[in-house]
Structures are given as structure tokens and as C-alpha cells.
Image (cartoon, grey):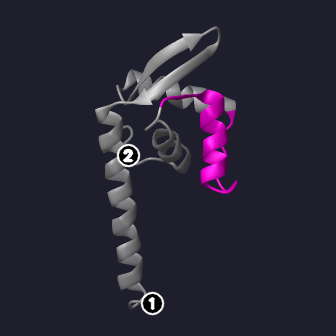
Amino acid sequence: MPREKFQTLTEQMFYILLCLRAECCGTDIMRRVDEMTGGQVSVGPGTLYNLLDQFAAAGMIRETGRKGRRRSYLLTSKGSQALLREYERLCRMKEDYVRGMGGQ
């Protein structure tokens, strides 16, 4: 059975949504992801704008403004819920790891 779209998020998806808790544009998102992760996660423009279009189509973000080619976005409640679900999933995985390693 195929997995529902956005049931789990990639690192790039997670950080893009996390950035969009505050209104920002694509270049701001790429900079913020780099800063948040200390350069460990990068989001290129092709990936970013493809995901922004997908998130908007799914109702997870909304466009808040446009100046020329620069568009700004903000997380919706549906996007916030997806971000929280992913955070909780990652926490469960961490707990499973700790238990699996005998509490180490």
C-alpha cells in the first residue's frame, strides 16, 4: 500500500516547514535552514521551489505576498500539524533507539 503524501517528511521538508512558522521568502528559507543546521542540511532552489509548490497545493502553506519574482509564504494549521506529527515521530524513534541500546 503506498504511503500517503507527507505522512513522513524528509529533512528538507521538515526544515522548510519549520522556517515557515514565520513569514519568509525562498532565499530566507535557504539561509535559515543553513543557519539552523550548521550547514548539515542544504536546500537548493530547485528542491525548495518544487516543495513550496507541493506544500501550497496540499494546503500546508499559503502565499502571503509577491513582489516581482519574490514570493513570501507562511505555515497553515495543516502544515503546523504535519510538522508536529513529524517531530513526535522523530521523538518516538529516539526513544526506540535508547530502549534498543539498553538505555545507553
Query: Which element is circle 1 on?
Result: loop
Residue 104: give its label.
1
For badge 2, the amino acid type reads Leu
Residue 49: where, in percent of width, then height? Answer: 59, 26
Q: Quadrant of residue 100?
A: bottom left
Residue 83: give its label.
2
Q: Quadrant of residue 104?
A: bottom left
Residue 46: where, in percent of width, then height? Answer: 66, 29
Residue 61 visible? The answer is yes
Say which of 5 and 63 sits in front.
63
Q: Residues within 10 Å of mark 1 (few under 14, many from 20)?
A: few
Decide if residue 48 is on the left or right side of residue 44: left
Q: Is residue 37 magenta?
A: yes
Residue located 34% across and 40% down the image: 80
Query: Which element is circle 2 on?
Result: helix
Q: Which residues are magenta?
A: 23-44
Q: Residues within 10 Å of mark 2 (few under 14, many from 20)?
A: many
Residue located 68% across and 36% down the image: 44
Say which of 55 and 29 sits in front.
29
Decide if residue 16 is on the left or right side of residue 47: left
Q: CA distance from mark 2 to mark 1?
A: 28 Å
Residue located 61% across and 43% down the image: 32
Q: Is residue 35 above or below residue 57?
A: below
Residue located 50% across and 14% down the image: 65
Q: Is residue 8 above or below residue 53?
A: below
**Residue at the front extreme?**
22
For badge 1, the amino acid type reads Gln
Residue 23: where, in percent of width, then height? Answer: 48, 29
Q: Is residue 84 above or below residue 52?
A: below
Q: Is residue 93 magenta?
A: no
Residue 56: give its label.
none
Residue 35: where, in percent of width, then height? Answer: 65, 50
